[in-house]
Amino acid sequence: MKRVKQVETAALLLLALAVSACSAEDREVPEKTVRKLAGSPEAVDARQDSEAGLRDVVQAYAERTPLKLGLVVVRDDCRGGTAKGWLETTDSDLYKISCGLNVTAYFGADPKNIVSVLDGILTAGDRNVPGIEFNHAVDGALIDYYRKPYDKRNPEVPSRDAVSQSLKWDPVRDRQWKPNFISEPTEPCENAPPVKRCLREPSSATVSAIRKQYGMVFQLDLGATYFKLMKKH
């Protein structure tokens, strides 16, 4: 009987140690740890490389297409892993930290030249300009749509998605529908490095000012997860 109790006690002790070790990884990652990881040399290097790559894409559109760059908004956000759920596992409870960059660029263009503007973008893609993922082979129907007379039965869809980017623009044929126009970036621009960072370049630029100058606005959205550390299980 005494030996049975000793075995039970040892088993309970091992179980308690296992639960303690497991729960440390299953808890929500403390903010202090998140900040430390976000400021680590590995995260900083990855952040710089990722941002440089996304900015190169924006520059490719500015230099190799008819679009005129007017505003760039960069959002950098690092999030700590959440506590493990009781019933199901989500991505956020599997990692210690996940850092991502979102770059949104706003360009101006002349709506009267929508065919040549889109053709210029697709031509750059045909020529394999690094960072431009749209081309005539996949997106050529856009040119045909804008060349044809407007047909209300064939509504305008002023957007296009690719593997790592999306492009949308003000409606040209349904310009009375103001809600469909590209809007101002309204999300708060938070800065709390190294966890949160936001840049607006130039700070005084607005979407409405770009539209007033050129006639219409294009919006290019880019994003990347550049640093992620998983919990040990």
Image (spheres, rainbow, N blue to C red):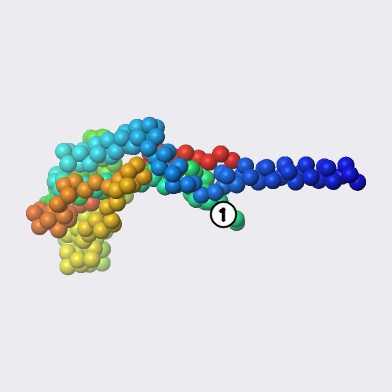
The quarter holding residue 224 reads: top left
The quarter holding residue 206 reads: bottom left
In the rendered image, is residue 119 in sight? no
Residue 31, how many percent across, how many down?
Answer: 44, 47
User: Taking 88 as reference, is 206 left or right?
Assistant: left
Which residue is drawn at the image coordinates 62% and 42% (left, top)?
Answer: 21
Residue 68, how many percent across, how many down?
Answer: 14, 46
Residue 185, how many percent across, how many down?
Answer: 24, 56
Which residue is most to the left?
A: 213
Residue 142 lies, with reference to residue 134, above or below; the image says below
Q: Nearer the viewer, residue 187 or 104?
A: 187
User: Taking 23 as reference, is 66 left or right?
Assistant: left
Q: Nearer the viewer, residue 174 or 201?
A: 201
Which residue is drawn at the image coordinates 34% and 32% (left, top)?
Answer: 45
Q: Which residue is mark 1?
A: 85
Q: Amino acid at mark 1?
A: Gly
Could you tell me how many numbered marks the image carries?
1
Residue 29, how many percent across, how many down?
Answer: 49, 46
Which residue is drawn at the image coordinates 17% and 68% (left, top)?
Answer: 176
Which residue is drawn at the image coordinates 89% and 44% (left, top)?
Answer: 2
- The quarter of the rendered structure image containing the C terminus is top right
